[in-house]
Amino acid sequence: MFKKLFLGLTVVASIAISCSDDDDTAVIVANAGTISGGPFTFDVDGESDFVSGITLDSSTSLGANSTWIITDDQGNILGLPPTLTAVEGVNFDGAGPGVCLIWYARYNGTVTGLEMGMNANDITGDFNLSNSITVTRNQVVNAGSLSGGPFEFTVDGAADFVSGITLDDTFAFGENSTWIITDDTGTILGLPPTLTAVEGVNFDDAGPGVCLIWYARYNGMVTGLETGMNANAIMEDFDLSNSVRVTRN
């Protein structure tokens, strides 16, 4: 009887030890947690656009490693900023029009596919993605920016022409374009179609005063784009660049 009791206790002890060993080697499955903030909508216009106010609820997050991920709307990885501060330093205007998704990820060990150009939905290993935050980047009409001048001429009967004006059209967008010359209140004096035409304007003929040279881009039909109207009152899908000043003494 004592032998049977001893054997029974041995079996129970073995089971207890086995259970204890299982607990010690339990696998911790990665969990990214939840992010909040946004959604964000920006205009692609050459001005920097940054996200802010994103927060991470990491109360249930598990995983030895972490990263933030920026993808397109198909999940293709565009960037892997290591921290939220790095995410907030991304200029989304530079990406052009489209949709980005911001994610947070936690993972254990080595995972496959966590790299630029791969798809976040295809990453394999002990890996988990949070929910995503949408960043929409809309293309808007943009005239770009002008450099050159300012110019100062003497009204003396001798022809005066501007030169050296340049257009940075890196972010310019719009089906149609024109150059505009106004007085200093914005009243349109002329609509030269090209920069060459602007450089052919004799400002001495205008008499003393101040002119402003602008570049414009627009889509479709706009209202008020004509001589005698005010450039600041033009309506519809229209954008003016900065101006170059021409003073006639």
Image: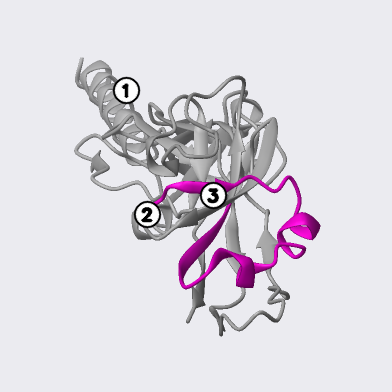
Q: Residue at x 32, y 22 (%)?
A: 11
Relative side of 84 to 229, left or right: left
Number of other residues with Cα within 10 Å of mark 1, as a class: few under 14, some 14 to 19, many 20 or more: few
How far is disc 1 from disc 3 in space, using C-alphas? 102 Å
Of the residues under marks 3 and 2, which one precedes in the sequence? Answer: 2
Disc 1 is placed on an element classified as helix
Q: Residue 88 — which label?
A: 2
Vertical order, 165 against 125 (above or below): below
> Image quadrant of residue 36?
top left
Front disc: 2 or 1: 2
Q: Tell me the amino acid under the disc marked 3.
A: Leu
Q: Earlier in the sequence, mark 1 or mark 3?
A: 1
Mark 2 to mark 1: distance in Å? Answer: 59 Å
Q: Residue 17: give x, y in percent of width and height.
A: 31, 34
From the top left corner, tell me how far across and down residue 205 is, in percent: 62, 66
Q: Residue at x 71, y 37 (%)?
A: 118
- Residue picked out by circle 3: 189
Judge the density around disc 2: few (<14), some (14-19), many (≥20) Cα neighbours within 10 Å. Answer: some
**Which structural element holds mark 3?**
strand
Q: Which residues are magenta?
A: 185-214
Residue 210 falls within the magenta-colored stretch: yes
Q: 98 or 147: which is nearer to us?
A: 147
Relative image position of residue 18 (x, y in whole percent): 36, 30
Dot 2: element: loop
The answer to whether residue 187 shows anywhere in this view is yes
Query: Which residue matches tag 1?
Result: 11
Q: Work out which residue is located at the far right of the displayed protein and give it.
A: 196
